[in-house]
Amino acid sequence: MVALATLGTSATVVFAWQLSALVTKIFILGNSIGDVYFQLMTISIAGLVKAAVIWAQELLSSRAATSVKIELRSKFYLAIKTLRSGWLNNQSAAELNLLATTGLDSLDSYFAKFLPQLVYAVLVTPLLVILIWLQDAASGVALVATLPLIPVFMILIGWATNNAQEKQLDSLTRLTQHFLEVLRGLTTLRIFGRAEVQVKTITSASEQYRVRTMKVLRITFLSGFALELLSSLSVALIAVSIGLRLVNDEISLLVGLFVLILAPEVYLPVRQVGAQFHAAAEGVTASKKVLDILDLASEVSRAGASNNPDYEGLDCDFEAGKLTVITGPSGIGKSTIFRNLLGLDSPVQSQKLHLVSWMPQQASLLSGTVLQNILGFDSSFNEPAVENKALVLAMQMAALDDLQLQDQVGVDASQVSGGQAQRISLARAFYRALTLGTPYLLLDEPISAIDSVRASVVVTSLKSFAANGTAVAVISHQEQLIRAAERVIEVADV
C-alpha cells in the first residue's frame, strides 16, 4: 500500500506538472505540437502508471479483504469450538449466523476501500500539501486552513453513523431470530391457527429494518454531500485566489495551473476516507463482536477450563457393573458433571470417557423418521433394518412400543410427545451401547417424562446393562431410579 501510494502520488505530480507545462508552452509561449512532444509522452506514461496503480490497489486490497475474512472466520469457528456448548447455549444462533456470514462479508468495504484510503490520506495528503506550499505559499496556507474541517465533519457524522449502524445490526438480528423461532414452531402455530398472525409480525419487523436501513443510507448520502461541498468550496477558494493573482501578475500560469490541478488531489483521499467509512461501518460493528468472542475464547484457553463449577473433589469414577444415580436439588450442577466428563464445556477435551453412550436431558431429535433418529440419517426404512436385532432390543429396552420405525418425528420432536421423544433418545443411547459395547452409559433424566409402567421397563434395562459390566450413571430425581441404584451420589450446595 505504501509503495503504491508513493508511486501513484509521483505519477500524479508528474502528470500535473507536465500538463501545466504543456498548456503554458502552447498558449503563452506559442510553441507548436512538435515542441511539446516530451510533455505529451510524459503525460501519457504518467496516466498509464496512475491507471496501473489504481488497478493494483483494487486487486491487492480485495485479496487482503478475502484473506482477512478467511482468517477471521477460521478463528471464529475455532473460538466457538473452544467455548463449547456451555457458552453456545446462552447465545443467539441467529446472531452468530449473521456474524459468520453477512457481518464478516461487510468487511470487504473496510479492507478493500476504507483502509487503503486511510493509508493514502496519511501518506499522500501531507506530501502534496508540502509540495504545493513550496510552489505557492498562499495556496498552502489555504489548504492547511481548510483541510482540518473535513476530519471534524467526519468525526461528527461518524458518531451518528456508528449509532445508526449498531441499531440496524440489532434490528436485523431480532428479525432473523424471530424468523427462526417461527420456523421452529410453525407446526404448532398452524395447529392453533396462529400462523397468519406471525406474517403480520414479521412484516412489521421487516418494515422496521427497512426504516433503519434507509436512515443509515440517508446519513451516508448527506455526509457524502457535506464532504463534497466542503472540498469543492475549498478548491474554489484556492482557484479564486490563483485567478486574482494571475490577473495582477503575482504568480505564473505554470505554477498556478500546477497548484490548481493538484489541489483536488489533496482533498480526495481525506474525502474518500469519510465516504468509505459509512460503507465499512457495518463490517466494523460486526467485527467488534467477533473479536470480543475471540478474546473470550483466548481467555478460556489460557485458563485451561471454562467457567463451570469445579467438581474435582467429587468422586465421579463410576464403577463398572454398577448402577450409579446422581441426585440433588435442581440447578445445583448435576448435568455439569456429565458435561465436564464429556468435555462439552471445556476447551480441553476429556479423554477419560473416550467411548460413551450419552443421553442429554433435552432430547436432541431432528426432523426425520424414528429409525433415522436412532440409527442415523443415512438409514432408510427397509426390511433389513427391521430385522436388526440390536435395534429391536434397544426399542424394547427403551419401552418404545407405541411408535413405528417409519413414523415421522418432526422438527424439534414436534410430532411426538415429550415421553416419546425421551424414549427415542433412550433407544438411541441403548443402540449405541449395544452395538459398540461402550464401557460407559450416561443418562440425564431418562424417565422424567415417562409413565410408571414404561419407567419400570427402563429401570430394568439399566440394571441389565450394569449386570453385563457397563458402568451406568444416571442423573435423576425419580425415586424409582434412586431405589434401584447400587450407589447414590448426593450433590449438595457448597
Image: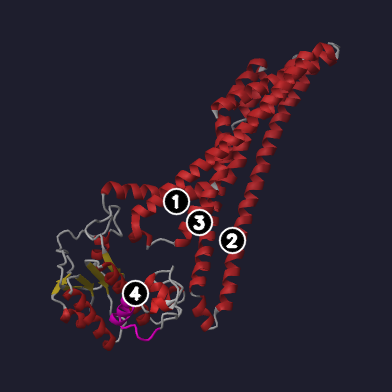
Residue kind at label 3, given as amino acid type = Leu
Q: Residue at x 45, y 46 (%)?
A: 72
Label 2, label 4: how many angstroms apart (C-alpha)? 40 Å
> In which quadrant is the C terminus drawn?
bottom left
Left or right of 407? Residue 151 is right
Label 3, label 4: how many angstroms apart (C-alpha)? 31 Å
> In which quadrant is the N terminus drawn?
top right
| Mark 4 secondary-structure assignment | helix
Residue 149 in sight: no
N-terminal of the two: label 2 or label 4?
2
- The colour scheme used here is secondary structure
Residue kind at label 2, given as amino acid type = Tyr
Residue 209 tag number: 2
Residue 98 tag number: 3
Instruction: Return the residue at label 1.
Output: 289
Quadrant for residue 369, please give it.
Answer: bottom left
Instruction: Return the residue at label 4.
Output: 425
N-terminal of the two: label 3 or label 4?
3
Nearest to viewer (mark 3 / mark 2): 3
Label 1, label 3: how many angstroms apart (C-alpha)? 11 Å
Label 2, label 1: how many angstroms apart (C-alpha)? 20 Å
Q: Residues within 10 Å of mark 4 (few under 14, many from 20)?
A: many
Residue 290 in sight: yes
N-terminal of the two: label 1 or label 3?
3
Asked whether residue 202 is drawn in magenta, I would say no
Q: Residue at x 46, y 57 (%)?
A: 96
Asked whether residue 390 is drawn in magenta, I would say yes
Instruction: Please state which of residues 491 and 245 is positioned toward the viewer in this rendering.
Output: 491
Residue contact at pointers 2 and 1, CB within 8 angstroms: no
N-terminal of the two: label 2 or label 1?
2
Residue kind at label 1, given as amino acid type = Lys
